[in-house]
Amino acid sequence: MNIKLVLALRRVGMVPTRKYSTLLKDRAYVNGSWVASSDGQTFSIQNPANGQSLGEVPNMGAKDAEVAIAHAYDAFSSWRETTGKWRGQLLRRWFDLVTKNEKELGEILTAENGKPLAEARGEVGYGASFLDWYAEEARRNYGDFVPSPARNKKMIFIRQPIGVAAMITPWNFPNAMITRKVGAALAAGCTTVIKPAEDTPLSALALAQLAEEAGIPPGVINIITCDRGNTPAVGEVLCKSLLVNAISFTGSTATGKLLLQMSASTVKKASMELGGNAPFIVFDSADVDKAVEGAMNCKFRGTGQTCICANRIFAQSGVYEEFCEKLSAATEELIVGDGMDETTTTGPLINEKAVEKVEKHINDAVSHGGKIMTGGGRHSLGGNFFQPTVVRDVPTDALVCREETFGPLAPVMRFSTEEEVMALANASEVGLAGYFYSQDISQIWRVAERLEVGMVGINETAISADCIAFGGVKESGLGREGSKYGLDEYSEMKYICFGV
């Protein structure tokens, strides 16, 4: 049991249940056992709201990664032979246990990530939905029958599990990004080795405990933890191992490119959900109040630390002033604080480096003519807390237009015509998500098709769900997660020809 985390929860008024004795882990999970690193080294997990230590977990290295991969490889030989129906039943049990323990999982998530409890519990529910979805999809990984061009041949396609899948997951959704990947992999018949983000390994380990309770066999799920110093070595093993056939990563584009380069040596199947720089467009015909509501939900959820949050906000001249004023007023209503406080709407940033990046983007925007309407600096709470900020009149050559901020900064830019804003919105090397508000049906079709992104929200910003194909275009990644298409990342198509 992780005593430090239990005490940290008590300090903020949470009363840990008996379940915490099994959900709070200070060991990694390999081949169905809770293990230390081979050299006994550990690293500390900090609460981003107050800097307090939540405990320590193993600081595993390349040797530990190789051991975990070997166990996953051994487990694959039997796991691949199980039926989709049976694998679905195990995923359903895991879903039931995650749902039953939503409160505790949410509090663990808030403690290590900082997001408000309501958002944390929402993430746990969202994460569980992928286990529910793939519990059903496991029996639907269909092949195909091909009408033969020859009378003496029968032709079919079958789908088979690709093998061991290595996964590297981010800190901003430490629960849901694991279930979205692992749910699909297990449904397809693959085994997994997961390296969670060094900032948020506790959520991953809690999920492993529940997977074990659900009856998922040893070696099918393996979780190795390590700090930033050991991450490059562990990542290299995951990418270059001959026993690993697929690599899945959610994180920055720069890191994704490095992983792709290393994976090329063994020609691995790669699924990459990388950086975004989402445009958010408000046309003159839009319902401005709804656009403001959408912008608030999209920009400030997770303190702006989501890959699909609005990063570049464009408002057309006819509604520009009204939109800016209403957005600023709504932003001032946000309540910054410790995520464990039920009244908090905006938690801390993950670390000091994240705070410095938001400051850099604001200073750059202002130096180029942008005007701060609200916020603009570090919060009086200190540490990793930052004021939710709106800056208007931001020029399109500002740093925020070229880089993903990943923080509570809403930069607003004015545009005049549809042609102008489409050029601005698509002037990015990445293309994950995009949003726009309009009541003009002809414009809606034009813009939705012309936006160079993988996902489009029209008069809506809550676009994520278990049933949708999540992913981007350009340098925002490869492949799709969620939906029936998520199975493709962990399956191989095999052609079989019968002579008759």
Image (cartoon, grey):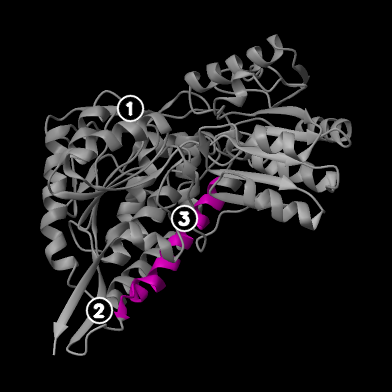
Front of the two marks 1 and 2: 2
Q: Residue at x 48, y 23 (%)?
A: 351
Front of the two marks 3 and 2: 2
Q: Secondary structure at mark 3?
A: helix
Q: Residue at x 74, y 53 (%)?
A: 444
Is 65 situated left or right of 487 in this image?
left
Label of residue 44 in the image: 1
Q: Secondary structure at mark 2?
A: strand
Q: Residue at x 76, y 32 (%)?
A: 331
Residue at the spot of label 2: 156
Front of the two marks 1 and 3: 3
Assess whether residue 132 is covered by the magenta stretch: yes
Q: Which quadrant would residue 19 be assigned to in this image?
A: bottom left
Judged by its main secondary structure, the magenta piece is: helix
Residue span colored magenta: 120-145
Instruction: Check disc 2: other Cα within 10 Å, few if <14, some if 14-19, many if 20+.
Output: some
Assess whether residue 118 is covered by the magenta stretch: no
Is 4 situated left or right of 100 in this image?
left
Q: Point out the tag, 3 or 2, that comes first from the N-terminus.
A: 3
Q: Residue at x 45, y 58 (%)?
A: 482
Q: Point out the tag, 1 or 3, that comes first from the N-terminus.
A: 1
Q: Is the residue 134 above or below the residue 18 in the image? A: below
Q: Is the residue 357 above or below the residue 477 in the image? A: above
Spatial CA span between label 3 and label 2: 35 Å
One can see residue 185 in this view: yes
Residue at the spot of label 3: 127
Spatial CA span between label 1 and label 2: 53 Å
- What's the residue type where badge 3 is placed? Gly
Is 275 situated left or right of 267 in this image?
right
Position in image of residue 311 (x %, y %): 62, 33
- What's the residue type where badge 1 is placed? Ser
